[in-house]
Image: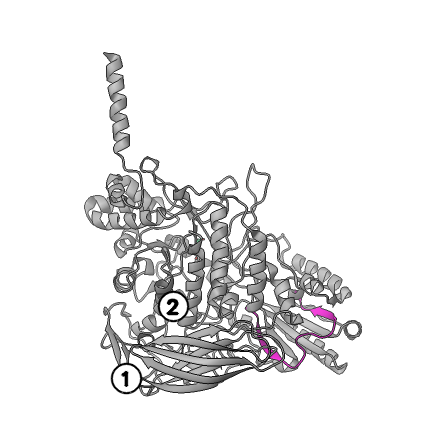
Amino acid sequence: MKKIIVTLGFIVVALCGYAQPQLNANNIDAVVKAMTLEEKCHFVLGRGMHYNDDDKFPGTAGSTFSVARLGIPETYCADSQQGLRMNANRAWDHRDYYTTDFVASMTLASTWDREAAFKVGQGIGNEVREFGLDWILSPAMNLIRNPLCGRNHEYYSEDPYLSGTIAAGYVNGVQSEGTAACPKHFVANNQETNRNSNISQVSQRALREIYLKAFEIMVKESNPWTIMTSYNKLNGPYAVQNRELLTTIVRDEWGWKGMYVSDWNAGDDAVAAMLAGNDMLQPGQDKQYQAILEAAKSGKLPMEVLDANVKRILEYVVKTHNYKGHKYSNEPDLKAHAQTVREVGADGIVLLKNNGILPLTGKSVALFGCTSYDWISGGSGFGGTSVGHYTVSLVEGMRSAGYEVYKPLISIYKQHLADEEKRLFPEGRPPFSLTPPARAEEKQFETGLLNDAIRHSDVAIISIGRKSGEAADRSEADFYLKEGEKQLIKAVSEAYHAQGKKVIVLLDICSPIDVASWQDQVDALVCTWQGGQESGFSVADVLSGKVNPSGKLPMTFQINYGDAYADKNFPANVDDKTLGAMFMWGYDKDKAPKERQPQKDIDFTNYEEDIYVGYRYFDSFGKPVAYPFGFGLSYTTFSYENMTCSVDGDFVTVKVDVKNTGTRAGRNVVELFVAAPNSKKLNKPEKELRNYAKTRLLKPGESETITMKVTTADLASFNEKASAWKTDAGVYTFMICSSANDVEAKTTAKVKAWTKKVNNVMKPNVKLNLLHR
Ligand code: BGC
């Protein structure tokens, strides 16, 4: 008898087990139904950060909840846009797990090359896959609104079209490897100061035309599997808790069906986030679990809403490598990826000024400036690197290109950097710091030493460095050169010029700095940006002429800080102590003083420049700049001939022949700007970037016909009164430009009216004093 009961028991258990659906792409609803309420509440939360040496993937940002009985595996995510951020070493493991340090986003955007973006995304997606993870928390793609934002190096451009298309290239690359991308931080997260609580107050028009536009283009061109919502509040509620933003605009209007994940510990109300449509909260907190569970029990969080969130997470899970049981190799092709870094790094370098010294003809160089010996490959923070095995130094890069690097300076700087290290960090460097550590002050030289260097070198190269990152913005002072940097440039330039020799300055920077006040002293100015692990090689490739520079600025270099209208509303001068304290309030809201008066640019930031961000401001209001958006020189010259523009229904097709008229092979970026009729009267920008293309490598004398399309919808502005996108009928001017300030060819075309009504949502809840033409 006993035997029969036991057997029956086994049969029942086996049947129940059998009756439990096992997750697959076609039974997601059944799996949601089979989950207990507790499982659902766990499932919408992350599983904490993986920061112990003994974790499966130490040093990574998190993972998702697994439910083994329903065949739902844990899936794994990591930062960042510059490479897979994961510790190279693990407990109980003899090997290392170095990943590739790709290029900073700003460098990538400077290529103006969608294929380069695809290649970088593909390389990162492949490393995520081959190291056993599923999901990369990138690309970061907030608009560059101000040169002092600490995370600019993680972002692409001041222009939504360039940002959106480069991001789309990257997402397509990541997802071509079956890895989930996660464009972030959605949206209007344009400063780091008080980032967890600041309210961005933005007009509906600027939101639609500038800040949302970049994401809209990316969503439509690449359909990311996930999107990360940002820390900041936007026109009232936290972005992560804003249903109008997440559901009405993105899901209902744009038709996006993917999964939202919050930025790490964003927001203050887990239930509101669920109701807004934010499917997953990372890294997950116990109190969030309790709040969601209680709200689901009480009906405050309707079960259909929770189920919809769970369903969208499952739709992501079934696409992942871990769900599919991918047998990862831990051996991605790091060599091939290094080659990509070198090439893209060189293509992202922007030649700003060249008085005939470049490409270098001499064979011996003297390297000045601490940054020449302490090269910066990327920014700091979680979005920065700390991945990669090495950074190819400038010295190594130049030597490998066959240059003799003046040796005495190498030992002088080595000693100087060691002394500075002791001065700046008497107790040693902290093992981890979110914000960039202080950098050495410049060394000055006596005439004798300088003269020796001049005697032994054909040219002087001075590197100027700036590093920034998450959690802090740069200060206004950081925009300008320090006294020591000014003195060094002056002394070296005067001494070299006195001997008839030239001086090149390299800008190894995270965001624009002042160049206008000192660049006349030097012969060439090269913006190298931050090019990842191979940067020494990439820089040498461009200086030597092995690669002809083809990068273009993805943002304006303004003359002074304060020149841009957006500078009026940005926290440019907050002291470090206040910054640090505010950062902690973000994580522990109870620590914030209760009775604080809201402070401008800290608690709220009014985007009074409205749509006039970057070149849209300088160009429309006739303000001079140091270097305009889209600017970049080459070692050859190009002509633009036979421009035509034809309209067929809703499509405008622009064609132009680009010819290499110089003596060296090179690639050229063709920028298509469009001016709307009556732009001034109608308060529209003078002209806007509507498309771009990059030629193949053209030999001297060779030409290529470039074709670019624009739709009538692409030309629309947002009309707040009508809550509609509107393209006015009329004659539009189509311009082929080599920068926002340099029109090379133009023609006009008659465009039909077009309009599309959208929801009247995301209104600012304060009156904004907006700039108007
Ligand atoms: C950053 C995100 C990042 C996340 C996880 C946050 O502090 O803002 O960009 O993905 O941490 O590391």
Ligand 1 occupies quarter? bottom left
Q: Which residue is mark 1?
A: 729
In the rendering, which numbered label is found on residue 270? Answer: none
Q: Residue furthest left?
A: 299
In space, the residues marked 2 and 1 are separated at their CA atoms by 25 Å
Residue sticking out furthest to the top: 1
How many numbered marks, from 0 up?
A: 2
Which region of the structure is painted magenta?
348-370
Residue 329: x and y in percent read 52, 43
Would residue 362 be found to the left or right of residue 607 on screen?
A: right
Q: Which residue is mark 2?
A: 214
Residue in view at x 44 percent, y 72 percent: 158
* Residue 687: quadrant of the picture: bottom left
Q: Amino acid at mark 1?
A: Ala
Q: Residue 487 in the image: state x and y as whole percent.
A: 67, 75
Please name the amino acid that badge 2 sits on.
Answer: Ala
User: Where does the N terminus fall, quadrant-wise?
Assistant: top left
